[in-house]
Image (tube, rainbow, N blue to C red):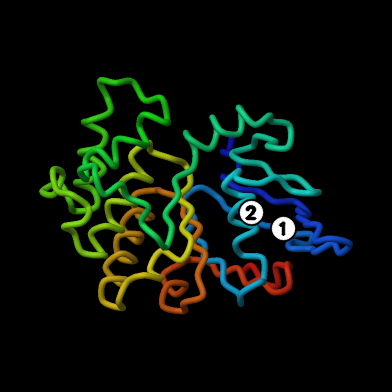
């Protein structure tokens, strides 16, 4: 039996009320992301990219339509079940690194294993493996403040993949990096994808989207192309 898609959106809608006005941030969105896919979501500001990312990441609920994550109907889950699924199935990488400056590199990565509920005996080996995977095994005792921007983003990526999620969601992951450093992070994403990880990257940067296998273009809350 074939595995279900990691992400499947069926006519998904998301509306917000602003006083007497209803804003349709996402309109009848359809998207299928299979295991091992590398998808870039692009579009101008206000096109619905971040709304889609929040829905796919189980940080928000759709106003209508259906969202299946690995075949699970997420509409049927309560908040506790959604948090459990999110902590085990989805890793997040943001434009800002969100690292704790008073914690070491290793401790920052370990935080994900604690929230995930990973058995205590597995936490440090898993964190060291993740840091080695992003090329920072020699920096585990360093403070994030002593690292370059590219190294800090790699720590954030290690924190996102340490729990071995099915999906890595990235929101403008190179936005705070210079072009050369950004390219090194994109090369790391290429390696992770080659290792079987599924990626969705939200970006406005063509250099980022060119690394993806597919580009999903959005405008005015609609998925215009999903080539």
Quarter occupied by residue 147 = bottom left
Q: Residue furthest right?
A: 20
Tell me where residue 96 appears, x and y as whole percent.
Answer: 39, 60
What residue sits 61% from the left and 27% below the top?
Answer: 80
Tell me where residue 188 appears, x and y as whole percent.
Answer: 30, 60
What residue sits 36% from the left and 29% below the top?
Answer: 114
Name the residue nearer the viewer: 155 or 42. 155
11 displayed left or right of 162: right
Q: Give neighbour class at mark 2: few <14, some 14-19, many 20+ (Cα, 10 Å).
A: some
16 displayed left or right of 145: right
Compared with residue 122, is residue 53 higher up or lower down, i.e. above or below? below
Tell me where residue 226 appears, x and y as whole percent.
Answer: 64, 67
Identify the image quadrant of the N terminus. top right
Compared with residue 184, is residue 80 higher up or lower down, i.e. above or below? above
Name the residue nearer the viewer: 103 or 134. 103
Quarter occupied by residue 102 = top left
Identify the image quadrant of the C terminus. bottom right
Q: Give neighbour class at mark 1: few <14, some 14-19, many 20+ (Cα, 10 Å).
A: some
What residue sits 20% from the left and 38% below the top?
Answer: 128
Tell me where residue 222 appears, x and y as whole percent.
Answer: 73, 68
10 displayed left or right of 167: right
Q: CA distance from mark 2 to mark 1?
A: 7 Å
117 displayed left or right of 179: right
Q: Which residue is mark 1?
A: 30
Q: Which residue is mark 2?
A: 32
Under circle 2, the secondary element is strand
Q: Residue furthest left?
A: 138
Name the residue nearer the viewer: 46 or 70. 46
Any mark on residue 209, and which?
none
Under circle 1, the secondary element is strand
The answer to the question of whether label 2 and label 1 lie on touching residues, with beta carbons closer than 8 A, is yes
- The number of callouts visible is 2
């Amino acid at each position: 039996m074939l595995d279900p898609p990691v992400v499947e959106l069926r006519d998904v809608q998301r509306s917000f009320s602003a006083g007497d006005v209803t804003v349709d941030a996402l309109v009848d969105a359809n998207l299928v992301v299979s295991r091992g896919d590398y998808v870039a979501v692009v579009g101008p500001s206000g096109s619905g990219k971040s709304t889609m990312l929040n829905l796919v990441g189980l940080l928000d609920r759709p106003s209508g339509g259906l969202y299946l994550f690995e075949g699970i109907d997420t509409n049927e889950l309560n908040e506790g079940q959604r948090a459990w699924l999110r902590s085990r199935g989805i890793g997040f990488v943001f434009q800002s690194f969100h690292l704790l400056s008073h914690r070491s590199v290793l401790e920052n990565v370990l935080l994900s294993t604690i929230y995930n509920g990973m058995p205590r005996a597995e936490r440090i080996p898993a964190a060291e493996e993740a840091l080695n995977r992003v090329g920072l095994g020699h920096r585990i005792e360093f403070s994030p403040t002593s690292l370059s921007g590219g190294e800090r983003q790699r720590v954030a990526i290690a924190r996102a993949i340490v729990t071995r999620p099915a999906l890595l969601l990235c929101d403008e992951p190179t936005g705070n990096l210079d072009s050369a450093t950004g390219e090194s992070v994109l090369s790391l994403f290429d390696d992770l994808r080659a290792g079987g990880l599924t990626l969705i990257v939200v970006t406005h940067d063509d250099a980022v989207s060119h690394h993806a296998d597919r580009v999903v273009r959005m405008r005015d809350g609609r998925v215009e192309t999903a080539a």
